[in-house]
Image (cartoon, rainbow, N blue to C red):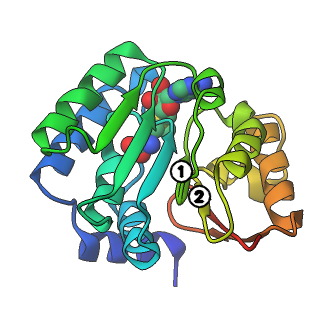
């Protein structure tokens, strides 16, 4: 069984999401030159299912892009759930704002248009879920903030944990690789966390806070 065949098989079963998600997916592709690389629907479905299982009331997303992953979280959350979305690119944040309106989620998705580390400093939490998907070099700093902003029972999730295979090869040369390596070491060695990298797409790390 080849991994690519399995991914393709599962992707076909999952489909592409609802109309607004398809719209946001297309806008995300158009925004690639700005560094917007949305998760694929398979990882999206996993985020939706984690939200259904964990029933978070508050989600923090670091690196929201046009909102594709945020919409998957919202699908799995109850109608009282809210999401704080951090996105530093103004043009991208504008598209995110349109997506939020199209999905009828005004008031439930709050957009913070600024650099993640300075926005994070002003947030208090606690958050039930934190999703990390911005600057890879800053992943260890995001983890510090995620720990500060969460508590026992919270979940910290991070995308791109395989980094196109660089992590598996131990290749430190690709930009961002060192940040992801440091993040990986920490989530598997911190006794407050129980962690796994799920090898879907570019790899999703799921860490549950034990304490
Ligand atoms: C991989 S994309 C996010 C995709 C999104 N999570 C999704 O799946 O639809 C990363 C996003 O993080 C933003 N970003 C990168 N570095 C950032 C930083 N330091 N602060 C805030 N946003 C940042 C980029 O502008 C980009 O939109």
Q: Which quadrant would residue 92 be assigned to in this image?
A: top left
Residue located at (27% from left, 20% from top): 94
Residue beneath disc 2: 157
Give the percent coordinates (x, y) of residue 106.
20, 38
> Which sits in the foreground, 130 or 45?
130
Query: Relative to 195, is 61 above or below?
Result: above
Quadrant for the C terminus in the image? bottom right
* Disc 2 secondary structure class: strand
Q: Residue furthest top?
A: 90
Looking at the image, tell me whether mark 1 or mark 2 is earlier in sequence order: 1
Cα–Cα span, label 1 and label 2? 5 Å
Queried on whether the Cβ of the residue with tag 1 lies below 8 angstroms from ligand 1, the answer reads: yes
Q: Residue furthest bottom?
A: 1
Residue located at (57% from left, 25% from top): 119
Question: Label for residue 79?
Answer: none
Q: Which quadrant would residue 67 be assigned to in this image?
A: top left
Contact, mark 1 vs mark 2 (Cβ under 8 Å):
yes
* Disc 1 secondary structure class: strand
Q: Is residue 208 left or right of residue 60?
A: right
Give the percent coordinates (x, y) of residue 99.
20, 36
Residue 69 visible in this rendered orientation of the protein: no
Question: Label for residue 131?
Answer: 1
């Amino acid at each position: 069984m080849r991994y690519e065949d399995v991914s393709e098989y599962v992707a076909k079963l999952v489909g592409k999401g609802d109309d607004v998600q398809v719209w946001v997916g297309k806008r995300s592709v158009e925004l690639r030159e700005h560094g917007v690389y949305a998760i694929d629907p398979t990882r999206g479905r996993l985020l939706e299912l984690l939200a259904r299982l964990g029933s978070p009331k508050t989600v923090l997303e670091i690196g929201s892009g046009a909102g594709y992953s945020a919409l998957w979280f919202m699908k799995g959350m109850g109608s009282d759930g809210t999401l704080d979305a951090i996105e530093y690119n103004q043009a991208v944040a504008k598209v995110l704002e349109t997506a939020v309106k199209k999905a009828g989620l005004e008031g439930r998705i709050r957009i913070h248009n600024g650099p993640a580390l300075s926005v994070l400093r002003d947030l208090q939490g606690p958050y039930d879920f934190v999703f990390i998907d911005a600057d890879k070099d800053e992943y260890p700093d995001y983890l510090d903030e995620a720990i500060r902003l969460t508590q026992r029972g919270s979940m910290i999730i991070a995308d791109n944990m395989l980094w196109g295979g660089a992590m598996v090869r131990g290749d430190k040369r690709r930009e961002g690789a060192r940040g992801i390596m440091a993040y990986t070491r920490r989530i598997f060695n911190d006794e407050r966390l129980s962690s796994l990298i799920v090898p879907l797409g570019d790899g999703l790390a799921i860490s549950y806070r034990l304490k």
